[in-house]
Amino acid sequence: MTAPLVVFDLDGTMIDTAPDLIESLNHTIAAADLEPVTFDDLTHLVGQGARVMIRRAFALRGAPLDEALVEPLLERFLAHYKAHMPGHSRLYEGLTDAFDRLEAAGMQLAVCTNKLEQLALPLLDKMGLTDRFVAITGGDTFSVRKPDARHLLGTIERAGGDPKRAILIGDSINDILAAKNAEVASIGVTFGYSDVPVASLEPGHVISHFNQLTPDLVTAVIARINA
Ligand SMILES: O=C(O)COP(=O)(O)O
Ligand SMILES: [Mg+2]
């Protein structure tokens, strides 16, 4: 039988990237004289990748955004983020111990993030995580991204997994909706960047620390969705 596959979101789930996202976004929008954003703002801005984050920051400030400036602003963001990577980013507590437990139980790990590949791949590398995963997909790996089911299903396919024996661990509506759209099990984490309580999105289960992420929990939440 196919090994169970545990698919992780990146920003706000495995890695606390908020300080770096905020710094790079503020550097970007400063070019248009927009006021800096805060962590609370970020929870409304993040989730659909850097391009959408920039667009949402302009909307937040009520500033018109000239379409011709979107790509130059994105380049400004990417250059700043890459130059400072890994910046202040840190793994959430207990993540690698959870990886060890899941792997020891014969489970495989993968990443499904809306972060662009050119940011996600080097960041995972710098955080020493790349070798853990059988597949890593970003917001531009396919023509669609979370919450579209095809992003998650494409990730599971690349990992050689089975959607009925997979689970997505994520912090935001894009994750939980992608899992629901794909009819894949899900676990929401409370410590990420959701602008609503993750429990209100009705994932299969909610955890507040990675010490709660055990092989038994993964097996139980997957079993429940197939019942
Ligand atoms: O960078 C984003 O906007 C979202 O990234 P995530 O899918 O890893 O949370
Ligand atoms: Mg996230």
Image: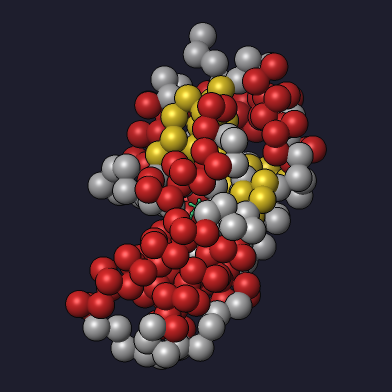
Q: Residue furthest right?
A: 211
Q: Front-most of 127 and 134?
A: 127
Find residue 179 and report its horizontal and vertical position in percent.
49, 42
Is residue 227 something that shows in the picture?
A: no
Can you say whether 45 is above or below 163 in the image?
A: below
Is residue 99 something that shows in the picture?
A: yes
User: Residue 83 vs residue 140: left or right?
Assistant: right
Can you say whether 49 is above or below 58 in the image?
A: above
Q: Residue furthest top?
A: 1
Q: How many marks?
A: 0
User: Residue 225 vs residue 158: left or right?
Assistant: right
User: Residue 66 vs residue 62: left or right?
Assistant: left
Can you say whether 178 is above or below 215 in the image?
A: below
User: What residue sits 59% from the left and 57% below the top?
Assistant: 87
Find residue 136 and report its horizontal and vertical position in percent.
44, 35
Q: Front-most of 186 and 183?
A: 186
User: What residue sits 40% from the left and 67% below the top?
Assistant: 77
User: What residue sits 62% from the left and 26% below the top?
Assistant: 223
Q: Residue furthest front?
A: 83
Find residue 157 and report its horizontal and vertical position in percent.
37, 26
Q: Front-most of 61 and 33?
A: 33
User: What residue sits 46% from the left and 58% below the top?
Assistant: 83
Report which quarter residue 152 is drawn in. top left
